[in-house]
Amino acid sequence: MNQEITQAINRDGIGYLDQSEAVKARFESIRQREVILEVRDLGKRFRSPQGEVDALRGINFSVHRREFICVIGPSGCGKSTLARIIAGLDHHTSGEALLDGKPITGPGQDRGMVFQGYSLFPWLTVKKNVMFGPLMNRRGDAESDALLWLELVGLEKFADAYPHQLSGGMRQRVAIARALVNQPRILLMDEPFGALDAQTRAKMQSHLIDIWRNVDVTVLFITHDLDEAIYLADRILVLKAHPGEVQEIIEVPVPRPRSPAQFDSPEFRATKARLAELIHPEPEPMPEDEQAVKPHLIRFTNVADNVE
Ligand SMILES: Nc1ncnc2c1ncn2[C@@H]1O[C@H](COP(=O)(O)OP(=O)(O)O)[C@@H](O)[C@H]1O
Ligand SMILES: [Mg+2]
């Protein structure tokens, strides 16, 4: 067993694989639910003039109804590629991805998407942004649907505002309302809070949990933030890079309902230690002659600052 896990267990007497009876029962009940998304031996090879890149290789996992799955991994490990394939915006080159048992071949109403960059139409009001999907699909009363979902994300007062009048967090709440108004089977979120400041980000995480508890939707949430993944997820799919492969799928032992106070719980710490060791493995020791800083090479500070 790796030293870091052992330390985490020693300090708190608990490891990331230890689950309380309540947590065990929750995972039991999740496994009984129908499978919404099934990814089987999925691969994606990009061909470019520089050569071929295996962005994803042999990816296998299933997501059950109303499960919250986080995908985590270092930059370039294929997280966005995976989200784009499930969204139907990109094609895989091997294996398959099934939504409700049917192969994904292109985009569809059954998937909602919230990405990092603000994807709202700047020339439409908040309400009209949310009405866009229902109007396109000629489904129901688009305006009252839009207002209902804006209320759920707490922005009904801003229905007639334009996106540029809102803060970053509020714009992402509109993006969530716009994705959910179509009542998708799965909500795909690719680092949706990555551009927000730490405080807004924390609020958005709690807000997203509240929304998810009130809506019949399954969430696949991509992040490279360990705390965010543990706080949000039922299970965390850990990817490694080059090629992008599944390292481990972790059942988060932190009980629900979640609260920020749990960041300091033994379960949280043990899970974080495991994620850290998967994602940031011990660096290879450098050859001795490269270890020392070579002050004669470059100075990044003005010598006259005289700090030494
Ligand atoms: N359109 C593309 N053409 C060629 N290579 C690509 C393309 N898109 C992504 N890649 C490569 O696939 C790998 C995974 O990229 P990506 O899914 O964006 O990773 P992540 O979102 O985890 O940072 C990277 O090595 C990236 O350079
Ligand atoms: Mg990405």
Image (cartoon, rainbow, N blue to C red):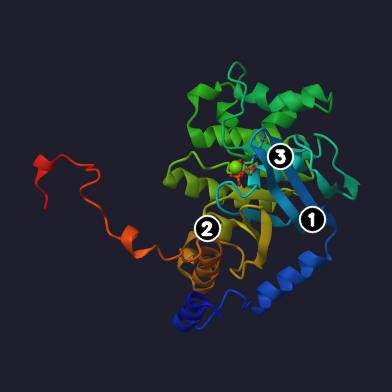
Give the tally of numbered discs. Answer: 3
Res 155 seen here: yes
The image position of residue 197, as x and y in percent, is 43, 42
Instruction: Quickly name the residue at label 3.
Output: 46
The image position of residue 81, as x and y in percent, is 68, 42
**Mark 1 vs 2, N-terminal side:** 1
Disc 1 crowd, CA 10 A, few/some/many (<14, 14-19, 20+): many
Where residue 137 sits, quadrant-wise, is: top right
Instruction: Quickly name the residue at label 2.
Output: 226
Q: Residue at x 63, y 78 (%)?
A: 20
Res 234 seen here: no
**Mark 3 vs 2, N-terminal side:** 3
User: How far is the residue under mark 3 from the one under mark 2?
Assistant: 28 Å
Q: Nearer the viewer, mark 3 or mark 2?
A: 3
Q: Amino acid at mark 3?
A: Phe
- Helix, strand or loop at mark 2: helix
Q: Nearer the viewer, residue 46 or 42?
A: 46
